Amino acid sequence: MDKFSLVLTLYYCEEYRQVIAEIDRWTGWEHQTVEEMLVSSLIEVNDLDRASEVIATKLREETSAEPFADLNRYMGLIHIKRGNYSLAQDYLQTSLSLGLKINGDSLHPDIATSYGNIGSVYQLQGNYSSAMNYHQKNLEMQVKVHGDSPRPDIALSYNNIGAVC
């Protein structure tokens, strides 16, 4: 069974959702939700319409800010793939604003990722000055979050800055 089929099966399995919710409640851990796994997989296989449907449904149901930030980030990624850069920018800025509101001044990898995503949109639009600014914010936060340990996120940040130059 491929990843997409497995995630699709889990998406429709209520028992799986209940087990994950219980584990999260007992441990305080935060797992990627089944919806997030499904959306991520749908984006990977370029099924953007179905990914948008799942997100739209979840946005109608959601009441807390943190999942809203994630869902807006996914919508931004979908619009990047569709070439709708200004719409992508709107969703990604909303995701960043919510992330900053949730986490305050504390360092968080999701906020760093938001900076990188916004930088990528500016780069695609040819606004290299703004792209560089956001990619540098991404790198600074990635280094603060992860320290000196070698991380793919940090390597990607350097790659993005190099691509803008």
Image: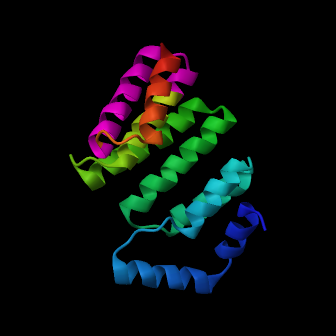
As for residue 128 lying within the magenta part, the answer is yes
Residue 28: horizontal and vertical position, in percent?
Answer: 34, 75
Principal secondary structure, stretch drawn in magenta = helix
The answer to whether one can see residue 21 in this image is yes
Residue 64: horizontal and vertical position, in percent?
Answer: 38, 65
Name the residue rendered at 50%, 79% in the picture.
20
Along the line of sight, which residue is nearer the eye, 11 or 30?
30
Quarter of the image with the N terminus in it: bottom right
Name the residue rendered at 45%, 22% in the picture.
161
Dividing the picture into quadrants, the one containing residue 124 is top right
Left or right, 107 with respect to 92, comes to: left
Name the residue rendered at 43%, 53% in the picture.
69
How are the colours assigned in the image? Answer: rainbow
Along the line of sight, which residue is nearer the eye, 90 or 125?
125
Residue 46: horizontal and vertical position, in percent?
Answer: 74, 46
The residue at the far left in this view is: 105
Dividing the picture into quadrants, the one containing residue 2 is bottom right
